[in-house]
Image (cartoon, rainbow, N blue to C red):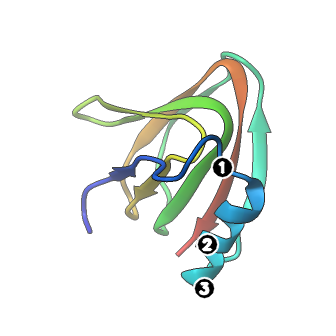
Amino acid sequence: MSEPRLTRWDGDGTPAEEELVHRFRVEHLSPYSWSNGPGDTYQPHSHSYHKVLYCLRGSIVFRVLPEGTDYQLTPGDRLDLPPRVEHAAIVGSQGVTCLEAAR
């Protein structure tokens, strides 16, 4: 996979944290949790690893550069970012909590 991939939540209602952790575990990934307040931003950067991220609460928009494609995540949505994909992010008006793991 060389392109980011957004997968929308396919379950009923808002996902429980345990469900999302289970989805990571099925892929033999060990997630950790992080949170940010409303309007927080991440400047453009990239990672040397494949990033797997689920939005647990709130919302966040990841902008993939240089093309400027936006990926908006709400609870249960998953974003896969391949290694070395430059991206920035802005947190939504309610803040955000995400679960993330490196593949």
In three-dimensional space, the C-alpha distance between marks 1 and 3, rounded to whole angstroms, equals 20 Å
Mark 1 — residue?
A: 15
* Residue tagged 2: 24
Badge 1 or badge 3: first in the primary sequence? 1
User: Which quadrant: the N terminus?
Assistant: bottom left
Residue at 43%, 40% in the rendered image: 87
Looking at the rendered structure, which numbered label has been put on residue 28?
A: 3
Give the residue at x 62% y 66%: 101
Q: From the top left corner, tell me how far across and down residue 20 is, in percent.
A: 65, 61
Q: Kindly identify the residue that appears in the image at 54 percent across and 81 percent down.
A: 27
- In the image, taking residue 83 as reference, residue 99 lies left or right, namely right
Of the image marks 1 and 2, the number of the one nearer the N terminus: 1
Residue placed at 55% from the left, 35% from the top?
74
The relative height of residue 41 versus residue 74 in the rendered view (above or below) is above
- Secondary structure category for the residue under label 1: loop
The residue lying toward the viewer, choosing from 63 and 72, is 72
Instruction: Single out the mark in the foreground, 1 or 2.
Output: 1
Residue closest to the eye, 82 or 66 = 82
SS class, disc 2: helix
Compute the Cα span from label 3 to label 2. Answer: 6 Å
Based on the displayed image, in which of its 4 quarters is residue 90 positioned?
Answer: top right
- The type of residue carrying mark 3 is His
Q: Disc 1 versus disc 2: distance between alpha carbons?
A: 13 Å
Estimate the x, y position of residue 71 in percent, counting from the top left: 39, 35
Q: Is the Cβ of the residue at disc 3 closer than 8 Å to that at disc 2? A: no
